Image: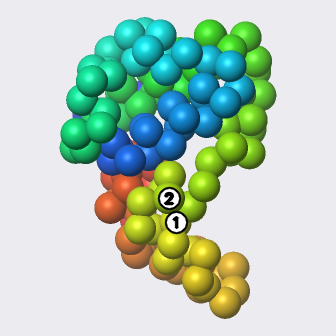
Amino acid sequence: MSIDQHSTVAMSVVRGILHAAEIIGVEPNKVCNEAGIDHAGIEAGGRITGAQFVALWEAITRLSNDSYSGLHIGEQTTPSSAHIVGYLLMNCRTIGQAIDRYLRYQQIVSNSLLEV
């Protein structure tokens, strides 16, 4: 998988994913070790690179031995996992409004998911 070398993802997203991974039986420390992410730095905030984000998902899939791990992680996440953008989307009246707001503000969470 190729990803822009300048892309980043907010640590709040990583925390939410790791929390959900733990719920489905995947050890967060092992995921971080495999993905090259400093587990101790997760609570401090900041951002990880897009390459680390891809490695995070690959490690979760490998360690869970579940090709649907992304779906199962999604079942466990909350709006707070998507930072303030998640709360913005929750308060939209329509899907169209939610998409418009996501496209406008998603780079707060990650500039690697969509380039607008």
Q: Who's the residue at 50% across and 52% down the image?
A: 81
In this view, the residue in front, 31 or 109, is 31
Residue 27, compared with residue 75, is above or below; it is above
Q: Residues within 10 Å of mark 2 (few under 14, many from 20)?
A: some
Give above or below for 99 relative to 14: below
Residue 90, above or below 37: below
Q: Residue at x 60, y 75 (%)?
A: 90
Query: Looking at the picture, how far across and down is residue 62, in whole percent?
Result: 63, 11
Q: Are marks 2 and 1 in contact (CB under 8 Å)?
A: yes
Instruction: Give the number of marks.
Output: 2
Closest to the camera, between mark 2 and mark 1, is: 2
Q: Secondary structure at mark 1?
A: helix
Few, some or many C-alpha atoms within 10 Å of disc 1 (few <14, some 14-19, many ≥20)? some
Q: Secondary structure at mark 2?
A: helix
Locate the C terminus and report the quarter of the image it occupies: bottom left
Residue type at mark 2 is Ser
Disc sitting over residue 86 in the figure: 1
Q: Which residue is mark 2?
A: 80
* Residue at x 34% of width, y 52% of height: 111
The answer to whether any part of residue 35 appears in the image is: no
